[in-house]
Amino acid sequence: MNEISQTNLPTRRQLHAQLDRMALSADAKVLMGKLLDTTAEVAGKIIEIGRQIPAFVTDMLKRFPNTGLGLVIGLTLTVVIGAIPFLGVVLGPLVGPILTAFTVTSGAMADMKNSSLENRSTCFRLSWTQ
């Protein structure tokens, strides 16, 4: 069983360096920097939530690449449909969620076909121990 623990996370310095190299606006970088520095205290232990979230997202994208691609394609097509003058206002809210659900489901089915069910059923667990 794979786990995400505080010991195998990238350091804050590494995450901030990656953030600085991204092609984002300065406002977006400031908001992402605040997210990276977010911590919470649970049961007397400090948990670096800002480092856990990117680790969780990248782990999920590594485990289920087709599902992530399906999500990106579905959301992109939803935005394109919503941008159609006049019709987009009506079609976007109706077709967008259905289209996104279809592409995510297609990606998930492809992920299931490409890997053994046993490996996916164990998935992962978050470990807060150090």
Image: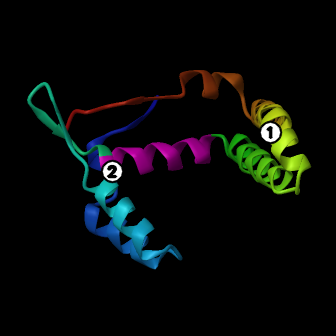
Left-right relation of 40 to 119: left
Q: Residue sitting at 62 percent across and 28 percent down?
A: 119
Instruction: State which region is magenta.
Output: 50-63
The disc, 1 or 2, on the residue closer to the chain's N-terminal end is 2
Verify whether residue 59 appears in magenta: yes
Q: Is residue 74 above or below residue 109?
A: below
Left-right relation of 96 to 38: right
Q: Is residue 84 above or below residue 106?
A: below
Can you tell which quarter of the image residue 128 is in? top left
Residue 83: horizontal and vertical position, in percent? 81, 57
Residue 120: horizontal and vertical position, in percent? 62, 27
Can you tell which quarter of the image residue 85 is in? bottom right
Mark pair 1, 2: CA separation: 31 Å
Q: Residue sitting at 61 percent across and 41 percent down?
A: 63
| Residue placed most toward the observer, 121 or 50 | 50
Q: Which residue is mark 1?
A: 96
Left-right relation of 79 to 13: right
Verify whether residue 58 appears in magenta: yes
Residue 28: horizontal and vertical position, in percent? 44, 66
Q: Quadrant of the C terminus?
A: top left
Pick out the residue farthest to the left: 44
- Name the dominant secondary structure of the magenta segment: helix
Q: Residue sitting at 80 percent across and 39 percent down?
A: 96
Q: Give the label on residue 51, or none.
A: 2
| Residue placed most toward the observer, 5 or 54 | 54
Query: What secondary structure is marked by label 1?
Result: helix
The residue type indicated by label 1 comes to: Gly
The residue type indicated by label 2 comes to: Arg
